[in-house]
Structure formats: C-alpha cells, structure tokens
Image: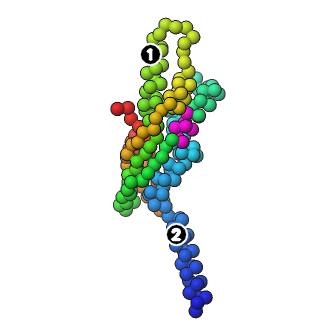
Amino acid sequence: MKNKLKLMMMAMITVFVSVGCSSETPTDVVNNYFDEIKKGSNAQVSELFMNSLDNDTDGKENEEESTEIAEAMKIYFSKINVDVLSESVEKDSASVEVELTGLNFAKITLAVFEESLSKMFEVQENDVENLDSEFLAKTKSATVETRKGTINLTKSDDKWKIKEDLSLTNLMLGSVE
C-alpha cells in the first residue's frame, strides 16, 4: 500500500511539474521577454532598434559605426530591469503592470540630434562628428530612470504573446518631456 501511495504521489508531482513548466502565465512571458532583451537575445527587438538607428542612406554600413551602435545597444539593453506590479487576465487577453528602470532612448536620441544640428551650423572645417560615436557617448553617460506602464498580451494557441503596441513602445523607449 505504501508503495502504491508513493507511486501515485510521484505520478501526481510529475504531472504538476510538467503542467507548471509548459503553461506560462502572462507575468512569466513578460519576465522572459525582458530577460531576453537584457541579454541581447531577443532578435526582434534588437532588429527594431538597429533599423531605427540606421542613418546610412546608400545601404552600406561602416564597420566602425555598426560596432559603436551595437555597443550602445548592448549598454542600453543591459540597463533594463522590470518588476511586475500586477497581472490581470480576462479570457484570452491579459495586461501586466510593470515598473521599468532603464535608459531613456528618446532623450538620448534627441540629445544627439540637437548636438549634431548645432554643429551643422558652425562654420568650421573637419568638425563633423560621427552620429554613432555621439550616440555611444550619450548612452554611456545617460542615467537610469524609472517608468511605469502596461504590457498587453493575447492568448493564441494556448500561449501568451506580448502585443507590440504603442504602450510597449513608449515603455521601452521612454519619452521626451
């Protein structure tokens, strides 16, 4: 009898562990998403940021510039931390309230463009700074700030997926106030 009880308990534990591991909650999905971003392993987000920074009009990338941008993005992503404040689930949609600490991409970008515009009107030869170098310098010197926001998710094929909407974009990029 004790052996049967032990076997039943082991079987139940195995079922609970299997079910627990295979069904992620919206909070789990959000935490995993930002863990991937922090590690630089979320290719979709990395590509989005790299495309928004690509200022080369002829399609050829300067290897030094792309290295500087990659380093800036690595710094930017490494500074992101997210704490889940609450989760709300209703049928096949969910929202997760988070507090994000990280650099403000919008402020960094604005500062780089403001400086480049002011230098553009100066009449000095050979004083044109590389935008990528300026972006890297601003990223290195930027301070971490805290933002709160909502991440919306939908359930599809029994898996929670983050909606890439304006709310998420504003949370990730920050704003210029």
Q: Residue at 59% across / 83% down in the picture? A: 7
Q: Secondary structure at mark 1?
A: helix
In the picture of the structure, the residue carrying the numbered disc 1 is 118
Which residues make up the magenta segment?
72-78
**Amino acid beneath label 1:** Ser
Magenta region includes residue 81? no
Q: Residues within 10 Å of mark 1 (few under 14, many from 20)?
A: few
Q: Is residue 15 above or below residue 59?
A: below
Q: Secondary structure at mark 2?
A: helix
Q: Residue at 57% across / 46% down in the picture? A: 39
Q: Position of residue 82 (x, y in %)?
A: 45, 48
Q: Which mark is residue 19?
A: 2
Side of 63 relative to 46 (left or right): right
Q: How many marks?
A: 2
Q: Residue at 51% across / 41% down in the picture? A: 79
Q: Residues within 10 Å of mark 2 (few under 14, many from 20)?
A: few
**Amino acid beneath label 2:** Val
Would you say residue 57 is visible in this rendering?
no
Q: Earlier in the sequence, mark 2 or mark 1?
A: 2
